[in-house]
């Protein structure tokens, strides 16, 4: 998936794909420095990755919370990073109009979990000509992705994947059910596991969300062992100072060891298995 050969990433199962980046674009210097660090890490370890960052956190708990630079500036930065570093980029969109703008610059269109049932948004993403990543809503059962997949297929989109990001578990909490990865894969869909949002505690701090970031690598290991096609990880040089979702992000300094462990698990899980029958 991508605009050209240099910006493409395969989901052929030989290696898990990693979607990596911060929660939100905190500034131009910040985003460039982080993107360069992630590119170097990917080259060192030998893993494909898609760079992720949001231009607008449109569903922040508080009206006082930082949202980002906006779509035009955000997509400009992501496009320049993609061209310079030769990596595909992804970001989340919130309206049909935003898809029209983002699809000119972005390789993988991400549909937020809260919006995954919005039919017009799904249709617009499917018609954009870009690959589509639908975050499965915290309120959906795994098999509830079937109608969403059918919506995408109905407009001629066959380049799409679903991301598992946890399921609502009581109040201000989520639980990650690894069976979900199996059931979604059984429907013939590519599945990515969102390790960092799965440990989020929505509204856990009253006017903002909290989370258990230290558990993100644990759940990522379980997901790779289960056989997901990729892992979504938000990372930050200093999560305590992040402008959004700091409590559930993985420190950038920890990321290389996390990725190396996930690759080792993937190698073991893949050994001697039939890809058609693997989850």
Image: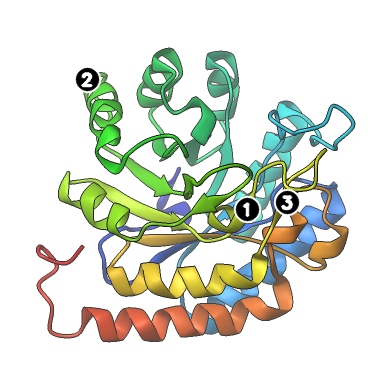
Q: Secondary structure at mark 3?
A: loop
Tell me the element at label 1: strand
Q: In the shown orientation, is residue 74 left or right of residue 136?
A: right
Residue located beneath label 3 in the image:
245
Residue for badge 1: 200
> From mark 3 to mark 2, how far is it between C-alphas?
35 Å
Q: CA distance from mark 1 to mark 3?
A: 8 Å
Q: Is residue 18 left or right of residue 272?
A: right
Residue under label 2: 154
* Disc with the residue nearer the chain's start (1 vs 2): 2
Q: Residue at x 66, y 47 (%)?
A: 53
Along the viewing direction, whichever of 167 and 189 lies nearer the viewer: 167
Place of residue 262 in the rendered image (x, y in percent of width and height, measured from the top left)? 44, 78
Q: How many marks?
A: 3
* Horizontal and vertical percent position of residue 111: 49, 33
Q: Residue at x 41, y 80 (%)?
A: 263
Asked whether the viewer can see residue 86, the reply is no
Marks 1 and 2 sit apart, C-alpha to C-alpha, by 33 Å
Residue nearest the viewer, comparing 187 with 28: 187
- 87 shown above or below 14: above
Residue at figure coordinates x 57%, y 18% from the top left: 95
The answer to whether any part of residue 127 appears in the image is yes
Give the mark nearer the N terminus: 3 vs 2: 2
**Do the residues bearing badges 1 and 3 touch, measured as CB atoms within 8 Å?**
yes
In this rendering, which labeled residue sits more in front, label 1 or label 2?
1
117 or 39, which lies in front?
117
């Amino acid at each position: 998936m991508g605009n050209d050969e240099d910006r493409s990433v395969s989901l052929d199962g030989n290696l898990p794909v990693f979607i990596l980046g911060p929660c939100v674009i905190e500034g131009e210097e910040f985003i460039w420095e982080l993107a360069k660090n992630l590119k170097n890490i990917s080259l060192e370890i030998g893993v494909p990755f898609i760079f992720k960052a949001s231009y607008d956190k449109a569903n922040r708990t508080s009206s006082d919370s930082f949202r980002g630079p906006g779509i035009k500036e955000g997509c400009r930065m992501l496009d320049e990073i993609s061209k310079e570093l030769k990596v595909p980029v992804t970001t989340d969109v919130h309206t049909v109009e935003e898809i029209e703008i983002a699809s000119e610059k972005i390789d993988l269109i991400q549909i937020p979990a809260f919006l995954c049932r919005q039919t017009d948004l799904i249709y617009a993403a499917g018609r954009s000509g870009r690959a589509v990543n639908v975050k499965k809503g915290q309120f959906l059962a795994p098999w509830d992705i079937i109608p969403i997949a059918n919506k995408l297929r109905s407009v001629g989109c066959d380049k799409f994947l679903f991301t598992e990001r946890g399921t609502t578990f009581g109040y201000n909490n989520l639980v990650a059910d690894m069976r979900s990865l199996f059931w979604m894969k059984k429907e013939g869909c590519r599945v990515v596991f969102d390790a960092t949002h799965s440990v989020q505690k929505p509204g856990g701090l009253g006017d903002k969300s909290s989370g258990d970031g230290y558990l993100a690598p644990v759940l990522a290991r379980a997901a790779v062992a289960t056989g997901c096609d990729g892992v979504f990880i938000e990372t930050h040089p200093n999560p305590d100072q992040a402008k959004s979702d700091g409590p559930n992000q993985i420190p950038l300094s920890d990321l290389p060891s996390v990725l190396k462990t996930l690759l080792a698990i993937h190698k073991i899980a893949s050994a001697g298995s039939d890809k058609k029958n693997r989850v």
